[in-house]
Amino acid sequence: MSIELDAEQHPRTKTGQNPDIDASLREKGWMPGQVDPAKAAQMLERSARRNDLQDGPPAVWSAGWVEVRYIAAFRTCLSLPIPTGPKAYGSNWPPILHEFEDQVGQASTGELGKGRNRVTRGAPIEEISAMYKVFEWALTVMRPYPVDSKMLQAWALFRSLGRDPDALATRLGVSERTFRRRRRQAATLCAERLNRLSVRTF
């Protein structure tokens, strides 16, 4: 089975345009203008997964979607203008929101982003509401499983920060394999209990 490409739409696949590629294709039993069926199937599967995410949340909770919501919740929390330490030296003047023309002028003079005129960006109210719902799971849905819930939350926090989640295993005193298994088990338990309680996906 092969998937034919339209030569007019894909001129790079025309016969004789790249003799090296044509020769390698013939050695593998393919003809120029054809795509590897295995690669084509993988591309279609990835495209379907992207379309599912773009269409909104799934109909029921799954372990993968629970993990997605946890990571999104921590990213939302980290994007909020929440003070995380003692106040540093600064000004009592409120931040000023500049128009686009003002920013163009500041960029031309090299003053863009300097001083106290920077406004901290937050998150939409829908994301904040979803964040609170996710953080409540530790006190409601996952209350009988506190250790697994902490592992899942710590993993999601590291993922949201762009750090290696497997480094958490040594901190928690477990092997990486055990950490991955218990984290996935926690996500599965959370999804099952959310479905049992008929909680709508978001």
Image (tube, helix red, strand yellow):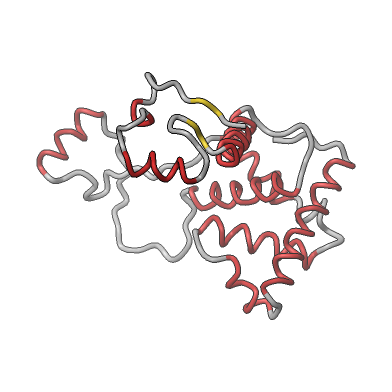
Classify the position of the C terminus by image quarter: top right
- Side of 108 where 125 appears, left or right: right
Position of the N terminus, as image quadrant, is top right
The image shows residue 39 at horizontal and vertical percentages of 56, 41
User: Residue 194 appears at what percent x and percent y?
Assistant: 82, 44
Q: Looking at this rendering, what residue extends furthest in the top direction?
A: 8
Left or right: residue 93 compared with residue 156: left
Q: In the figure, is residue 179 to the left or right of 21? A: right
Q: Residue at x 42, y 45 (%)?
A: 24
Q: Position of residue 139 (x, y in %)?
A: 78, 55
Compared with residue 107, is residue 156 higher up or lower down, i.e. above or below? Answer: below
Q: Quadrant of residue 120?
A: top left
Specify the farthest residue to the left: 109
What residue do we see at 59% from left, 37% from top? Answer: 37
Q: Is residue 83 above or below residue 128?
A: below
Identity of the residue drawn at 79% across and 59% down: 185
x%, y% of residue 65?
Answer: 70, 44
Give residue 126's quadrant in the image.
top right
Q: Nearer the viewer, residue 58 or 36?
A: 36
Mark count:
0
Given residues 125 and 85, the one toward you in this image is 125
Residue at 51% of width from left, 45% of height from top? Answer: 28
**Camera-side residue: 169 or 73?**
169
Q: Looking at this rendering, what residue extends furthest in the right direction?
A: 196
